Image (cartoon, rainbow, N blue to C red):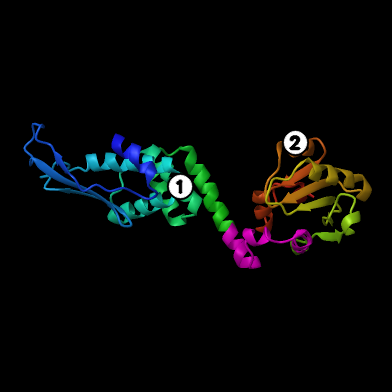
Amino acid sequence: IAYLKDNILLLRYGFGSNVKHDFSFMNHEIPEFIDVKVDYSPYIIWCIDNAYGIDDENLLVGKIIEHLFMLLTKTGYSEPIIELYKYLCESNLLNLNADTLASIVQSLLKYGEKQLIETAVLELKKIEPKHIIIEISNKHLRRMQVLNQISETFNISISDIQKLNGIEFEMFLENQFIKYGFKVERTKGSGDFGADLIIETASGTRASIQAKRYKQKANLKAVQEVVASLAHYQTDFGIVITTSGFFQSAVDLAETNNVELWDEDKLIQFLSGDFDFSMLSKS
């Protein structure tokens, strides 16, 4: 294991050994030499030849696999972990501890491997049903489901939305608010006094909307702009909608100025038709 730890970081996907190991010093009735082979082509396969039942219960192999997963996790590459886990699932060789399964789930989340995530979470629940990664993965799976619904409904993905320019993003939001029964008024571009859209609920509640199609986090200025619009347009509260997230300074200002911040997660939730997180649902 020490040898693997020192050398695995030098390679991207795996390692191999085709050497003879002398076990004659051990007081066991086993051959003087045991062939040990580790291949990755494209899977990692362990072969112990002529071992005469030395590891009938796969305890040694199980420990090796656990260490292997942990070492692969430290390389920062998810793909070999996914391929190895697929192989183990197909070979019915799963017998991993909670920490190893949690590391596997984290790697699977990066690649959105829905079926494998569900399999790994199910195995983890049997060992440690309250592990924090279970709720994280469930949230991720729900998000994947919503994104699929959005893609099917609007024929557009979040990555497509992030490619829209500012005006296109405003028009996209305008169409969605109209779809959900809001009255929508577009402001005058550069002279918008801090709001891109003014929306009104059936009960007459009005909100100023500032749309920020950013890849980076939205800053304090976005909140300052929508705060300035409240008095001018006589709206009840403001909403800043972005395709990313918000700096803490923006969060702090919004909390004291009756402004809602919709990050990518809340935008996705809104597009799915669920905006219970917003004051709009109570108006």
Give the x, y percent position of residue 207: 83, 50
Q: CA distance from mark 1 to mark 2?
A: 32 Å
Which amino acid type corresponds to the residue marked 1 in the rendered image? Ser
Query: Which is nearer the N-term, disc 1 or disc 2?
Result: 1
Residue pictured at 80% horizontal, 35% vertical: 256
Give the x, y percent position of residue 146: 59, 57
Which amino acid type corresponds to the residue marked 2 in the rendered image? Ser
Residue pictured at 80% horizontal, 59% vertical: 182
For residue 220, which numbered disc appears in the image?
none
**Mark 2 surroundings within 10 Å by alpha-carbon count, few (fewer than 14), some (14 through 19), many (20 or more):** few
Residue pictured at 78% horizontal, 48% vertical: 239
**Mark 1 surroundings within 10 Å by alpha-carbon count, few (fewer than 14), some (14 through 19), many (20 or more):** many
Horizontal side of residue 141 vs 184, given as left or right: left
- Residue 130 vs 198, above or below: the answer is above
Horizontal side of residue 246 vs 65, given as left or right: right
Q: Quadrant of the rendered structure where residue 59 is? A: top left
Residue 96 makes an appearance in the image = no
- In the picture as drawn, the residue positioned furthest to the front comes out as 10
- For label 1, the SS is helix
Most frequent secondary structure within the magenta stretch: helix
Instruction: Assess whether residue 236 is covered by the magenta stretch.
Output: no
- Residue 85 vs 21, above or below: the answer is below
- For label 2, the SS is helix
Give the x, y percent position of residue 126: 37, 42
The residue at which mark 1 appears reads as 107
Q: Which range is magenta?
A: 147-175
Which is nearer the eye, 281 or 147? 147
Give the x, y percent position of residue 179: 75, 64
Residue 242 makes an appearance in the image = yes
The residue at which mark 2 appears reads as 249
